[in-house]
Image (spheres, rainbow, N blue to C red):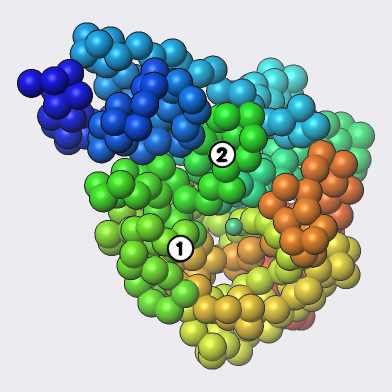
Amino acid sequence: MSVFGVLTLWAVSAFGQASDTMLQAKIFAANRVERTRVGNSFAIDMVLPDYVVVTAPSNQLEEIKKLGFAYEVLKSRGFPEADKEYHTYAQTNDELDALVKEFPGLVQKVTIGKSLEGRAMNGVRISSSSLQDSLPTAIFVGCHHAREHLSVEVPLRLARHLAANYSKDGRIKGLLDSREVWIVPMVNPDGAEYDISTGSYKWWRKNRKNNGNSTYGVDLNRNYGAYWGGEGSSGSPSSDTYRGTSAFSEPETQAVRDFVRARKHATVLLTFHTFSELILWPWGYRDESISDEKDRNVFETMGKKMATWNHYTPEKSSELYLTSGDTTDWAYDELKIFAFTFELSPSSLGGGGFYPGASVIDPVVKDNIEPALYLIENSKDPYAVVGRSHIDPLGIL
Ligand SMILES: [Zn+2]
C-alpha cells in the first residue's frame, strides 16, 4: 500500500474521533496526485506549488510525519497589518483580563462555555454589586458570525467605556451600582480565528463544525431553538445559512442559551452583527409583528429611540428578510427578553462591507455607546419606555 493509501485510511478513521486543537499547517505535497490524496481527507484551504495548507486537529497533523509527509504549523497570522487594531481571540481575552485587573470590585471574568475547538468563550460581568444575578440585567454579545470582526470591537470597547467611567461619570456609576451588565464579545471564536488565520480574510461566517461531507460550519444565528428550521435558514451543510442538524446542536449556541437562561433578571439583550446600519427586533421568522401589543410598543419605542443616536434604520427583523433560529427570536420567545440585533456600519458593501478597516472602529463604538446606556438604563423596567407605571416613577435610577 502506498503512503497515500495509508494516509487516507488513517485520516478517515481519525475524523471519527474527538477533535484536538485545530491548527493550520502546510503539508508538503508537490504534485497533483499527492494533493488529491491529501484532499481526500483534509479540507484544503490553499494550494501552492510545493505544499497545501490545511486546517486540522493537531493529533492528525502529528501522525502525518510518521506517514512520510512533512508538515509545518503556520502560526496564525492574525489581522492584516492595516487592521491590527482589531482584536484577535487572544487579544480579546487579554483585554478582558486587563479590565478585571484594572477594575477590581467592578469587573469580573466569566466563561460561559467552550467552542467546538475548545476555546473558552469569555466575557465580563460589570457591576459594583457583588451579589450575582440580583439586579436588573442587560446582556451584550458579539461575533456570532466570524467575519463580522467589528461586532467584537463594539461590545469589548463598551466594557472598557463602562468600567473606566464608573468613577468619573455619575450616570454610569448610578447604572453600575443598580444594574448588572454582562458582555460576551466573541461567541464564535473558532470562526473568527479561522477567518484571519492566513493573514488575509477568508470571508468565513459560520462556526467550524465538520459536517462530515467535506463541508464546514453551522450558522450560529440560525441554530437557536425558537422556530428553528423555518424560512431564512438552510438545511444544506454547504450553505452559509446552514442551520445545523437540530436546534442548539452547537456548543456555542448551547453556551449562550444556558448563560442567558441563568441571568434571572435579564430584561434586555443586544447582539452585534455587521453590516447595514440597522436596529432589528423580533420577529425574524415570520412577517407578522409580535402579537402582544404592549411588548410590540416597547420594541418599537426602544428601537426608534436608539436610532436617534446611531442613525441606523429601526425595523422589525423580517422586514429585511426572514430568518429563523436567530438569537433575538429565541430570547424573546422563551424568556420575554427585549432582544435587539444591531447591524453595525458600514451601510453597504461599497463602504467596506464586513471589512471596513480600522478607521471605523472608534466612530462606530461612539455611535453605539448611548444606545447601550439606554438599554442598560431601561433594563430596570423596559415597559417604562411606553409610560407604563413602574417602580421608579421619578426617574431617579
Ligand atoms: Zn451577522
Look at the image and tell me whether residue 244 can be seen.
Answer: yes
- Amino acid under label 1? Thr
Which quarter of the picture shows residue 325? bottom left
- For mark 2, what is the residue? 195
Question: Foreground residue, 253 or 260?
Answer: 253
Dot 1: what SS?
loop
The response on whether ligand 1 sits within 8 Å of label 2 is: no
Q: Amino acid at mark 2?
A: Asp
Q: Nearer the viewer, residue 47 or 45?
A: 47
Pick the front one: 370 or 130: 370
Number of the label disc, if any, that sits on residue 197: none
Closer to the chain start, of discs 1 and 2, is 2
Q: Position of residue 3 (x, y in %)?
A: 17, 18
Q: Quadrant of ligand 1?
A: bottom right
Which class describes the residues within 10 Å of circle 1: few (<14), some (14-19), or many (20+)?
Answer: many
Instruction: List the residue tagged with mark 1.
Output: 241
> Does residue 82 appear to the left or right of 168 in the view shown?
left
Residue 178 makes an appearance in the image: no
Q: Residue at x 63, y 78 (%)?
A: 320
Note whether 278 is above or below 176 in the view shown: below
Where the C terminus falls, by quadrant? bottom right
Q: Position of residue 116 (x, y in %)?
A: 37, 38
The crowding category of the residue bearing disc 2, from other C-alpha atoms within 10 Å (few below 14, some 14 to 19, many at least 20), is many
Position of residue 272 relative to residue 235, above or below, is above
Residue drawn at (80%, 32%) of the image: 82
**Mark 1 vs ligand 1: CB below 8 Å:** no
| In this rendering, position of residue 367 left or right of residue 81 | right
